[in-house]
Amino acid sequence: MSTTSTTSGHATASAGMSAPMVALFALCAGVLVANLYYAQPIIEAIAPAVGLSVPSASFIVSLTQIGYAIGLFFLVPLADLLENRRLLMISGIATAASLVGAAMSAHPGPFLLVSLLLGLSSVSVQILIPLAAHLTPEAQRGRTVGTIMGGLLTGILLARPLSSVLAQYFGWRAVFLIAAVMTLVTVAIIVLALPRRVPDHRASYFQLIASLWHLFTRYSVLRQRALYQALLFAAFSLFWTAVPLELIAHYGLSQSQIGIFALVGALGAVAAPIAGRLADAGHTRIASYVAMTLAIVSFLPGLADGAVGLYALALTGIVLDFAVQMNMVLGQRAIYALDPASRGRLNALYMTAIFAGGAFGSAVASALYARAGWHGIVATGGGLALLCLLALVSRRN
């Protein structure tokens, strides 16, 4: 598709997306979402440099996710009202500016404020995914969304090792500067290669935001899938915020070694395309049971200690990431089928709930680890996944 192509409503959905275009969407999604996670494995390096205590360090991650949740709720719905490519360009430029601000900060107040703004401006990826859903026919939507989510989730998981290695050799400020350059390159790709989409919806911004409550109360599937994924993402964020602390305290790993460790989680990205195909085939419920059960079981290896402890933590990372990614795509496939004209808003509600859960997991991680150790992380993470499974079991249809 050329830069001059324009879609409105469902005009191009029947034609679908070419494989190169799907790959391009996946690449852009991965680069854009990675900005939310670069700070996660290096909070112990950032905190003293900007005047934060170690127990307060996890607020760097949680504020970014809170900002992201705010952006999801108040900015992503604009995808149902305004031309999508322009929204992607503006939010991408704002993200790059926030990354530069983070690199330049030397005090806790400005750094935490920039962390919030970074999350707020990074919602462009959640405009990108509904756009792909609009361009794809129903029979292939799960597969397309799954592939793009695979790119997005790979970006999440590769952000940690990249951040750790860069911080080890060039300092943590270089991480944010390099991320800013990558983001600007991605914005250029979006402007040059992605199609335009002008929504059919006509309303004021305040009417658009007011309609979110109507959509939330109208669709029980949306409420259920948002709850499931919020609980699983809380467990996911809890693990990945706390595990660098455990790796440093009990295993003496350096930042670059933590980066190598984080690479194992990228293996879980294969779950997204698998989940998309299962959803297209009508197996959403059974696949959800599998994902949630795996999430619970994934924390059990974390109880191991001694020589096998490090490998047990790696196994937890792989299985947990696989489970969370599978359930994420299953939920997106389900909500995108509810109302094609409202996909931006439906996605905003779904992702807002998810990242609110993620912000909770990140916020409590440092304090929980300091008070209850790694066993406290295991018990809490496994408990959140169990609550998710019980919520699914309680729904009979």
Image: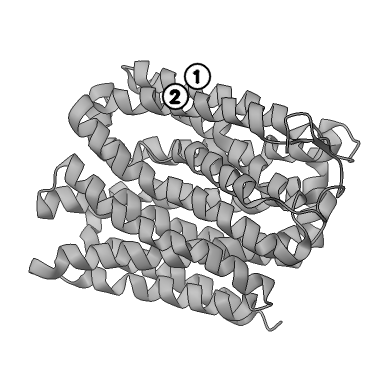
Q: Are marks 2 and 1 in contact (CB under 8 Å)?
A: yes
Residue at 70% across, 60% down? 141
Q: Which amino acid does label 2 sit on?
A: Ala
Front residue (pair 279, 288): 279
**Residue 14's quadrant in the figure?**
bottom right
Q: Residue 185, percent across and down?
A: 51, 26
One can see residue 53 in this view: no
Q: Residue 128 appears at what percent x and percent y?
A: 65, 42
Q: Mark 1 points at which residue?
A: 97
31 up-or-down from 317: above or below: above
In x, y percent, where is residue 33? 50, 41
Q: What residue type is labelled 1?
A: Ala
- Please name the residue shown 23% across and 60% down the image: 374
Q: How crowded is mark 1: few (under 14 residues within 10 Å), some or many (20 or more)?
A: some
Q: Is residue 82 above or below residue 348?
A: above
Q: Nearer the viewer, residue 161 or 380?
A: 161
- Residue at left 57%, top 22%? 93
Residue under label 2, please give it: 180
Q: Classify residue 155 as left or right of residue 288.
A: left
In front of the other: 185 or 305: 185
Which quarter shows the C terminus? bottom right
- Along the viewing direction, whichever of 242 and 155 lies nearer the viewer: 155
Q: What element carries label 1?
A: helix
User: How many labels were placed on the picture?
Assistant: 2
**50 with respect to 33 (left or right):** left
Q: Let me know if residue 39 appears in the view.
A: yes
- Closer to the observer: label 2 or label 1? 2
What residue sits 11% from the left and 54% below the top? 251
